[in-house]
Image (spheres, coloured by chain):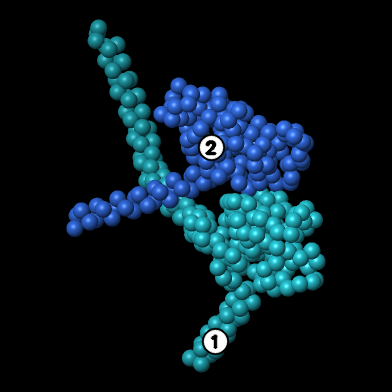
Chain colours: A blue, B cyan
Amino acid sequence: MGIQNLLWQVTKKAFTGGIIGVTISDRCCSVVPVRGDSMSPTFNPQRNSYLDDYVLVEKFCLQDYKFARGDVVVFRDRYIKRIVGLPGEWISSSRDVIRVPEGHCWVEGDNKASSLDSRTFGPIPLGLIRGRVTGVVWPPQRVSKIS
Amino acid sequence: CRLAPWFCASAFACFFRQRFATREMRWLRYLNQWRGTAKEAFDQVSIVAKFLCLLHVTDRYIISSTHVQGPSMLPTLNLTGDVILAEHVSHRFGKIGLGDVVLVRSPTDPMKMVTKRVLGLEGHRLSFFADPLVGDDSVNVVVSNLYIQSLHLLVPKGHVWIQGDNVHASTDSRNFGPVPYDLIEGKALLRVSLATTMLWVIEVTITFELFQLLLE
């Protein structure tokens, strides 16, 4: 009986903690690992998966979707790129000049050589953005705020 | 008499210490009361906070009610507004199928949510008639000029084609093209009709009043 009660208490606490954690990560901020080197040298300057950067992503920007050129954003919970074009602006890609439609944005990785971004798949809807990166939190020697 | 100053000093010290001691004890009493109240307040606030977190999780990950309005889904949904129950589970597992009414974040304005029907999944070919008044409109779609480049339209990978039931008054994929699957936020389950809810409430109230009258 004692162990059953203990298990129930532990489950309840874990459930509550999980719910609070999910709410905070949806509305406030979360930590996301940077995979790949499409954002070198800003993130992951070395190609070693043990030293992947972990970045802090803030979610307050999702209240009104107001971004600025140069913001590093996370979309589809996995891809991290920098916004280079806002809605209504003209972007010159390799072959022609493209206008970014309303409600979309043009993203590019800092490492132009190895980055799948809007030059490949075109402007992305702002609704896909899941947060804005504010700084690196791991590894400790690379902790920094990014502008 | 050499001890006298020391005596006076210690007497003064005792006197002052006693006065400070009473003041300290009073403050300690206040502090304890405040601590009790503060703990109670903290408990209440934490209960409210936990409830709000649960509400957020249910609203975003399980089921939620939304008020939708507009002419684009006539006759399925009302012009003046309907409350629909939408679930947020199927789209995470890829279980959105043809013909589902879905809640989608608008690709032209990320602050707006639109309700449309899915008429094409990735890899589907959609054929269309140029003129909406000619031909049957069961599965064919009418495409705006931007996309009339071939007789068939292929929905790209990771995208869906959404369209309102009222083809004459709906901005949907015919205007802004196929939308990415990840913009889908929920699938509509059922409509809670405002009229029937109100009628039900009126009926229950009248029955209750009659019941009370009968009892008297």
The Cα–Cα distance between marks 2 and 1, rounded to whole angstroms, is 55 Å
Looking at numbered disc 1 in the image, what kind of residue is underneath it? Thr
Viewer-nearest residue: B24 or A29 = A29
- Label 2 crowding class (10 Å Cα cut-off): few <14, some 14-19, many 20+? many
The reply to whether callout 2 and callout 1 are in contact (CB within 8 Å) is no
Give the left or right position of residue A31, taking residue B32 as reference: right
Residue B179 at x, y percent in the picture: 65, 53
Q: Quadrant of residue A138?
A: top left
Viewer-nearest residue: B166 or B109 = B166
What residue do we see at 32% from left, 20% from top?
B13
Label number found at residue A57: 2
Say what secondary structure mark 2 lies in: strand
Give the left or right position of residue B37, taking residue A26 as reference: left
What residue do we see at 64% from left, 34% from top?
A108
Q: Are marks 2 and 1 on the same chain?
A: no
Label number found at residue B207: 1
- Label 1 crowding class (10 Å Cα cut-off): few <14, some 14-19, many 20+? few
What residue do we see at 49% from left, 59% from top?
B89
- Is residue A139 at all visible to an observer of this figure? yes
Instruction: Classify B79 as above or below B19.
Output: below
Q: Quadrant of residue B197?
A: bottom right
Q: Nearer the viewer, mark 2 or mark 1?
A: 2
Quadrant of the drawing holding the C terminus of chain A: top right
Residue A45 at x, y percent in the picture: 51, 24
In the rendered structure, the residue with mark 1 lies on which chain?
B
> As drawn, which residue projects farthest toward the left?
A1
Viewer-nearest residue: B113 or B182 = B182
What residue do we see at 59% from left, 71% from top?
B191
In the rendered structure, the residue with mark 2 lies on which chain?
A
Viewer-nearest residue: B67 or A68 = A68
